[in-house]
Each structure stands twice: as structure tokens, then as C-alpha cells.
Image: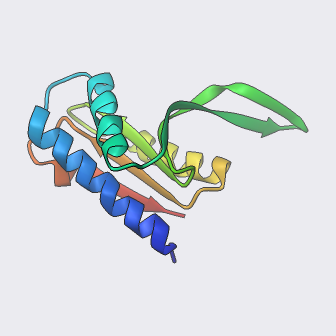
Amino acid sequence: MLSEQEEYLAKEIVDCAFKVHKQLGPGLLEKVYEICFCHELSKKGIEHKRQVDIPIFYDNLVFNEGLRLDVLVEDLIICELKAVDLVNPLWQAQVISHLKLTNKRLGFLINFNTPVIKNGIKRFVV
């Protein structure tokens, strides 16, 4: 079960994605959606970080390269943003792996390159 804060932020994240998609529509670069999505989060006073490196712990070593989150919201929720025709199932596995590696419970895969944004939002809870 998710906390009230996680559920509140989840609704706000979806609202931000809807606003961006309504304003811009499909067909732009991922980076454009990321910038505008983060702007919408800022307008709501929601803390977030863009392009966050995830350390890898392996064989008693720490590697600080290789994995990166698109957006981390309030240090609680991972948002991976895409602007593609077809969502690769590997990206869904990637979100789940990122959740496990960061000990987060909630993540979103948001594809802005879809006619109806609700069809482009997938929510993951681990």
C-alpha cells in the first residue's frame, strides 16, 4: 500500500502529463516533454530532479555510471518519459529495475507520443 503522499504525488504527476500533452500534443522530442513536465511540477511546488544518476552496487563496489532516471519526484517517485510510436517492453522492465535499485515503490512510464495521453501512462508499484 502506498502512502498518502505517494498517492497525492501520483495524481499530480498524471495531471502534469495531461497538461503538457494537451498543450503540445504528440510528435516532439522527449527532452521537450521532460522540460515542460518539470515546469508543470515546479508550478505546483513539487520538488523534482532531472537526469539523476543511479549508483550500482556490485561485488562490494559502487559504480556511479550507466543508469540514469529521467525525473525523480520528491525523492519518492520515478518518472521515465518517452516520445515513441511503440513502447518497448524492456522500458517497463527498466522502470521496475530502477525502482528496486533505488528502493522506491512507485514509478511511471509516460509516453507523450500518443493521441490520447491516458493510453501513454503506465504506473508501476513494487
Q: Work out whether 107 lies above or below 39.
A: below
Quadrant of the rendered structure where residue 98 is?
A: top right
Q: Residue, x 32% and y 57% (percent of image)?
A: 12
Say which of 9 and 53 sits in front.
9
In this picture, residue 114 sits left or right of residue 62: left
In this picture, residue 114 sits left or right of residue 56: left
Q: Position of residue 16 (x, y in %)?
A: 26, 48
In this picture, residue 34 sits left or right of residue 77: left
Q: Is residue 25 visible?
A: no
Q: Residue, x 58% and y 47% (percent of image)?
A: 97
Q: Position of residue 76 (x, y in %)?
A: 55, 55
Give the quarter of the figure containing the C terminus: bottom right
Q: Work out whether 45 lies above or below 68.
A: below
Q: Position of residue 83 (x, y in %)?
A: 26, 31
Q: Work out whether 33 lies above or below 19.
A: above
Q: Residue, x 24% and y 36% (percent of image)?
A: 86
Count the labels in the image.
0
Q: Is residue 84 visible?
A: yes
Say which of 121 and 39 sits in front.
39
Question: What's the coloring here?
Answer: rainbow
Quadrant of the rendered structure where residue 111 is?
A: top left
Q: Position of residue 77 (x, y in %)?
A: 49, 53
